[in-house]
Image (cartoon, rainbow, N blue to C red):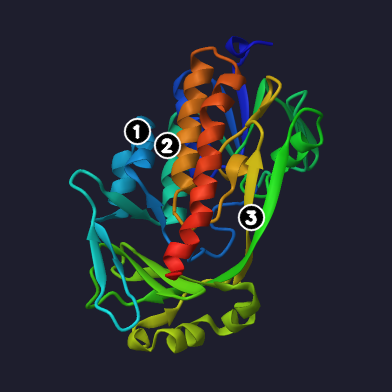
Amino acid sequence: MGMSAHRTVGIVGAGPVGGTLAILLARAGWQVDLYERRVAGGVARSATVNLSLSPHGMAVLDQAGVGDAVRAESVEMDGRVRYGVGTPPDTWDYPTGWRNHAADREALTQVVQEAARRSGASVHEGAACRAVDPRRGRLDFDGHTKTHDLIVGADGAYSLVRSAMARCAGFDVFQRHYRAAYGELSLQAGGLRPRAIHIWPRGRCFMVALPHHDGDLKAALIVPAEAAERLADTEAYARALFPEHADRIRRAPSVRPPTRDFVTVRCGAYHLGDRCALVGDAAHAMVPFMGQGVNAGLQDAASLARHLIAGRGLQAYSAERQPEGVAAAELSLWNHGELCGE
């Protein structure tokens, strides 16, 4: 079956990347089913540090018609501030015309999902995919099976779709764990530059904080694996590491325990045959030390939609995006040393 014959697509994972792909394909007349295992409002809201949307990512959201809605829910950042030990803060302003946006992950997901529905996509909440047949385009859920002309895995770093592809001859994937841990915090922004990314390097660990639309900063404290137990009380540990900010550090309202390990995923291609493809973290999970994961994923969505609508094969999509994913993953690993001040 050639790509020009594709008219139905099942996208597993309704986050910002999967949702954006759904918008682009539905607006082009495709029958789109967007599957999400979670149910809106069914779990406690995460306080995950905000996403940093670059102009490249925002350009894709503009293409999908949701750029203005995302800007209304985000904070336009104008630079970054780095705090060394015993030295004045090092401030760097973004160049003219370049603005990153700090976006709440849940708010971004909601904007994209609502736009996907308006575009004609069917969004299935509480649809936990149990098995995938990437050769036949089949998805198995509890009690029923759906077959699509095309399956797209947008289901994150531990993608079920990618796992199914990896069991097929001709698909190569490499996975590496980066031994570290992080906990989440909120910081009162009073006295700090309100629209900047803030970075505190401390040897083998660091804290990074992005502005939030409520006026505070959402922060993550990243530590080496052997210090993970100290994150049992992230607030106390952060105050000990950064006593100059002890009064502004607050525990994040998150039910999630500190996260251990980051995973990097590299695939030899982002497709298998002509009925299965990957986008976002499912294709190229990377450590978050450069903040480019979501932007790379949004660019995947735009690229895949463009090639599909033009009737080109999935190989053209892989050829365009796979080198970019490898490069972004490498740069993200390298950037850890810069953030730590090593």
Along the viewing direction, whichever of 159 and 270 lies nearer the viewer? 270
Disc 3 marks which amino acid? Answer: Val
Residue 273 location, quadrant: top right
Disc 2 marks which amino acid? Answer: Ala
Where's residue 295, x and y in %? 44, 43
**Residue 86 vertical placement versus 42 (above, below):** below
Asked whether the viewer can see residue 66, the reply is: no
**Residue 162 vertical placement versus 255 (above, below):** above
Disc 1 marks which amino acid? Answer: Gly
Using residue 195 as the reference point, say whether residue 222 is left or right of it.
right
Where's residue 250, x and y in %? 42, 81
**Distance Cα–Cα, label 1 vs label 3:** 32 Å
Q: Residue at x 26, y 48 (%)?
A: 99
Q: Which residue is mark 1?
A: 65
Q: Which residue is mark 3?
A: 263
Residue 341 location, quadrant: bottom left
Which of discs 2 and 3 lies nearer the camera? The answer is 3
Q: Which residue is mark 2?
A: 115
Which of discs 1 and 3 lies nearer the camera? The answer is 3
Q: Tell me which numbered mark, 2 or 3, is placed earlier along the sequence.
A: 2
Quick check: marks 2 and 3 in contact, CB under 8 Å? no
**Distance Cα–Cα, label 2 vs label 3:** 30 Å
Q: Residue at x 50, y 24 (%)?
A: 305
Asked whether the viewer can see residue 111, the reply is: yes
Where's residue 340, x and y in %? 45, 69
Circle 2 sits in a helix, a strand or a loop, which is it? Answer: helix
Q: Residue at x 25, y 58 (%)?
A: 79
Quick check: marks 2 and 1 in contact, CB under 8 Å? yes
